[in-house]
Amino acid sequence: MGGTSPAAASGRRQPIVEAAIEMTARDGWAAVTMTRLAEQVGVSRQTVYNEVGSKNALADAMLAHELHRFLAAISGAFDRHAGDLVEAIHDAVRDVLDLARGNLLVRAIASATHGADTELVPLLTTQAETLLIEVKAMLAARVETYRTGLTAEQAEVLIDLMTRTVLSHVVQPTGTPAATADGLAWLASRVLEEPVRKPLRFG
Amino acid sequence: MGGTSPAAASGRRQPIVEAAIEMTARDGWAAVTMTRLAEQVGVSRQTVYNEVGSKNALADAMLAHELHRFLAAISGAFDRHAGDLVEAIHDAVRDVLDLARGNLLVRAIASATHGADTELVPLLTTQAETLLIEVKAMLAARVETYRTGLTAEQAEVLIDLMTRTVLSHVVQPTGTPAATADGLAWLASRVLEEPVRKPLRFG
DNA sequence: GATTTGACAATAGGTTGCCATTTGTAAACC
DNA sequence: GGTTTACAAATGGCAACCTATTGTCAAATC
């Protein structure tokens, strides 16, 4: 968002952020100091400051980095199944859940989105509230490209439900990612099937 | 669960628990001391101890009390619509969300269920994990009484999804309870409608 | 006879001051 | 450009301390 700085253009920022993520997952956010991080990456502490700015900015960058992986996973699922929304949903759910499994950082983010507080959460004030919105917006755009027979409003309901359910499974899983994906895909197929139905039950 | 003690039989326990809930919602759990609670109710501190036993037991009683209100709301919705599962779901969702709105204690419980930690959460260790299971079991029993055309497995998927979504809305609402209920009821109707469909899309 | 009262030890929780670490910035250096 | 060194300010942990609260008892009270 802040213009393409020359620092961001060089490939120095990414390794730092990735190392910070790994350190956080391994030792916890409290154990991530700029000194240790610099040592880990093999640059000077000053360079870390030049690249990321501050520790809060580092947290933001970590979050953005992880979020991007998830958005990419979802995009990939939709790209692979451009002709079949149910299959796209199935793969997206499974891939997201697979990605989330064992990813402590993501679990923390997801918990925060649900109103929790971890040591990382104070830093998520802005990001956490927009996360759900961002994901939903992206899904709305992707779903639009299929012939669903749903109104925009109905699609939104379906997306809201899918998003919240998957997020819930990220935080507190039941069964395997594949099993959850099967369930949600089945449900989506029921909702999306052509409305050749017994005409009329309510007004 | 501990047998019907004469103390529990008298109506002395309930006012104490209710006052504790109100105090917690108003001033936070930390501000709830046995002395203040006794003053509020108009009994001696000793009586509070006689009735509830300990502070942890008080927390448990509060939780059980609130959980019961929700289960009752759900039961009521199903009782009112014994012939129409979609309507039952609609009312259950709306009533639960209405009940949850502005109920700080419940919000805390729901957050805990999703893996958070509040000041109350340490006391929920056992209850929180079983809460979802209890609700789901009750729903499964109620849904069974309708002619849904769903297998037990499919019904479970639907229940899991509804439960998680509603819980998510308790913690982080979008729109009014009525609007959310409309959305979920519509979705349920799509899922539950008689399978008079275009035969076969997948194997 | 149940409830309240007053007393009590044990414990939890909240300060206070201190010290080590870390953050964030700026200069000198290569 | 990046690294090193230096430094003030802020942060976070630690330890002693003290207050408030928990939990239990027996005697007093209605």
Image (cartoon, coloured by chain):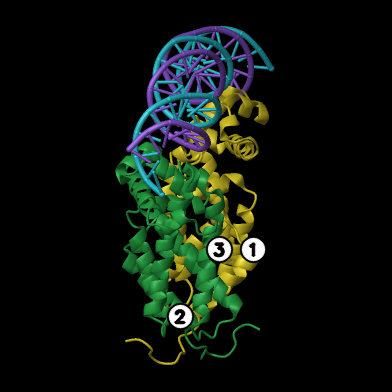
Chain colours: A green, B yellow, C purple, D cyan
Residue A108 in view here = yes
Instruction: Look at label 1 and name its amino acid.
Output: Gly
Disc on the earlier residue, 2 or 3 = 3
Q: Is residue A99 above or below residue D12?
A: below
Q: Is residue B82 above or below residue B190?
A: above
Residue A18 drawn at (x, y percent): 36, 52
List the residue tagged with mark 3.
A133
Q: Are marks 3 and 1 on the same chain?
A: no
Q: Is residue B20 above or below residue B161?
A: above
Kindly check if marks 2 and 3 are in contact, taking CB atoms under 8 A apart as contact. Answer: no
Q: Are marks 2 and 3 on the same chain?
A: yes
Q: Quadrant of the N terminus of chain B?
A: top left
Disc on res. A151: none
Q: Quadrant of the C terminus of chain B?
A: bottom left
Location of residue B155 by image quarter: bottom left
Residue A117 drawn at (x, y percent): 49, 44
Residue at (46% x, 90% y) in the render: B197
Q: From the viewer's side, name the closer residue of B98 and A81.
A: A81
List the residue tagged with mark 1.
B175
> Which structural element holds mark 2?
helix
Q: Residues within 10 Å of mark 2 (few under 14, many from 20)?
A: many
Location of residue A70 by image quarter: bottom left
List the residue tagged with mark 2.
A190
